[in-house]
Image (spheres, rainbow, N blue to C red):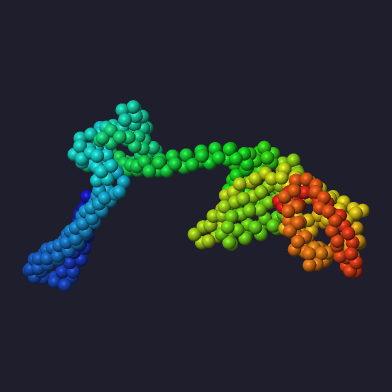
């Protein structure tokens, strides 16, 4: 209508301008060129005929032009309406148009028919209240009354199918005029699958939380690309930190690793990422009280599509008591080793794999052999017993099964200078060493 009005005004304006210019210019021209009155009348007639002809041509061209443009506009509008109708009818999401006054359905698409189970005619005979549980209708009416924005995100609602089954949807709507009536275009997104996934995720999260609590240890997730570390578990009991104090960045984690262990940890992470294996490293970690605690970091490596380290999910195990025990045992073994080395009589400690762990200086002084020559029991028996080595070794192997001291008897040994001595041997079990071997 706007285009037709503007076209008519344009044609009228052109006709009026042409007529005015024709009258002013042609009359003055004829008076100047033809002063005789009888001839002037004849030429006025010719001028009138010419004016009618020219004005007809001008009006025709303008009307034809307007008609062509009007046809193009109508075609474009029809194409646009068809495209929007196709988008509406073929949209994979349920859509409908409802009357704001009566709440009646004015139009529905095929996806709505399939999702809700009603035929198109059944839909058009209902209102939007009919696809809601009765207890939700008051909330629906309140929402419709309070919705004034043209575009509205109404959030999540319960809808009901023809068979009575309920399901959750997300509603978005937009105001429009439909066949002269105030209406809203609605898009409904079925949240059934999303809710199922959310429920599964929540169940998994709850199981993980229960597992973390049952472990009584610290669980973490490190995402280096986002510079984030997420902590769970008993970090407050074990390390003394609150959630804020322990930090949530890569720097806050790395800065708490003992300076002497940082290079080792970095190398282990790089090695695990490069070789697609789990992280397994022990290191000292700063506690809230300023002291360091031994922790065993065991993590699973995850990589992104480009093969880069995406994250590490791991367990932070408290091994401080074990490390203290190991250190105490190491110190005890060191003291025992020193006691053996400086014993006033020949003494030797060996492990079940044959390694000589300690040998007294008295043993070396009497036999004349150097400590470097007696690295294993096999070395000693070969030097001291020669051809009888195999027989002696068989007797030594049974010593690891003892649970008390035993006197083995007297044996002739050969010294480095070729002399022989008679030694009376006694053996006693040491039990398991710090590395698990029997001694």
| Residue drawn at (14%, 70%) of the image | 35
Percent from the top left, x then y, of residue 73? 23, 56
| Residue drawn at (83%, 53%) of the image | 409
Instruction: State the image quarter where residue 290 is shown.
Output: top right
Horizontal side, residue 351 vs residue 335: left or right: left
Percent from the top left, x then y, of residue 144? 34, 33
Q: Residue furthest bottom?
A: 33
Instruction: State the image quarter where residue 157 is shown.
Output: top left
Q: Is residue 55 visible?
A: no
Q: Is residue 298 visible?
A: yes
* Residue 415 versus residue 10 in the image, above or below: below
Pick the front one: 308 or 100: 308
Horizontal side, residue 423 vs residue 434: left or right: right
Horizontal side, residue 405 vs residue 20: left or right: right
| Residue drawn at (92%, 53%) of the image | 344
* Residue 349 versus residue 231 in the image, above or below: below
Percent from the top left, x then y, of residue 289? 74, 40
| Residue drawn at (24%, 42%) of the image | 113
Pick the front one: 314 or 222: 314
Pick the front one: 291 or 121: 291
Horizontal side, residue 238 vs residue 133: left or right: right
Please tell me how many numbered marks the rendered image carries. 0
Percent from the top left, x then y, of residue 141? 33, 30
* Residue 182 versus residue 430 in the image, above or below: above
């Amino acid at each position: 209508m706007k285009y037709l009005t503007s076209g008519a005004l344009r044609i009228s304006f052109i006709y009026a301008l042409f007529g005015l210019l024709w009258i002013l210019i042609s009359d003055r021209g004829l008076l100047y060129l033809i002063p005789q009155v009888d001839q002037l009348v004849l030429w006025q007639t010719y001028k009138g005929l010419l004016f009618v002809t020219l004005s007809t041509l001008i009006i025709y061209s303008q009307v034809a032009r307007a008609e062509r443009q009007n046809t193009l506009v109508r075609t474009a509008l029809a194409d646009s309406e068809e495209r929007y109708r196709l988008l509406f009818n073929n949209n994979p999401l349920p859509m409908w148009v409802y009357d704001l006054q009566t709440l009646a359905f004015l139009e529905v698409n095929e996806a709505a028919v399939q999702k809700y189970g009603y035929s198109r005619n059944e839909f058009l005979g209902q209102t939007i209240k009919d696809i809601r549980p009765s207890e939700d209708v008051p909330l629906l009416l309140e929402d419709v009354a309070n919705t004034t924005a043209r575009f509205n995100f109404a959030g999540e609602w319960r809808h009901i199918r023809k068979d009575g089954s309920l399901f959750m949807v997300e509603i978005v709507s937009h105001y429009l005029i439909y066949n002269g009536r105030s209406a809203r275009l609605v898009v409904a997104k079925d949240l059934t699958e999303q809710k199922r996934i959310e429920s599964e995720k929540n169940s998994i999260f709850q199981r993980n939380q229960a597992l973390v609590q049952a472990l009584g240890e610290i669980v973490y997730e490190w995402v280096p690309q986002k510079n984030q570390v997420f902590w769970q578990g008993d970090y407050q009991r074990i390390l003394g930190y609150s959630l804020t104090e322990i930090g949530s960045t890569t720097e806050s984690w790395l800065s708490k690793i003992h300076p002497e262990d940082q290079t080792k940890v970095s190398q282990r992470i790089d090695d695990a990422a490069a070789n697609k294996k789990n992280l397994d490293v022990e290191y000292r970690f700063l506690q809230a009280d300023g002291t360091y605690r031994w922790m065993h970091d065991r993590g699973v490596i995850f990589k992104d599509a480009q093969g880069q380290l995406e994250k590490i999910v791991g367990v932070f195990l408290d091994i401080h008591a074990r490390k203290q025990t190991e250190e105490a045992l190491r110190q005890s073994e060191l003291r025992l080793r020193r006691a053996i080395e400086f014993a006033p009589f020949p003494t030797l400690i060996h492990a079940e794999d044959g390694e000589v762990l300690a040998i007294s200086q008295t043993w070396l002084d009497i036999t004349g052999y150097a400590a470097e020559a007696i690295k294993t029991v096999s070395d000693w028996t070969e030097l001291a017993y020669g051809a009888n080595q195999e027989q002696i070794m068989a007797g030594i192997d049974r010593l690891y099964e003892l649970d008390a001291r035993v006197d083995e008897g007297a044996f002739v040994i050969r010294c480095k200078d070729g002399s022989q001595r008679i030694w009376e041997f006694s053996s006693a079990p040491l039990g398991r060493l710090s590395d698990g071997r029997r001694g």
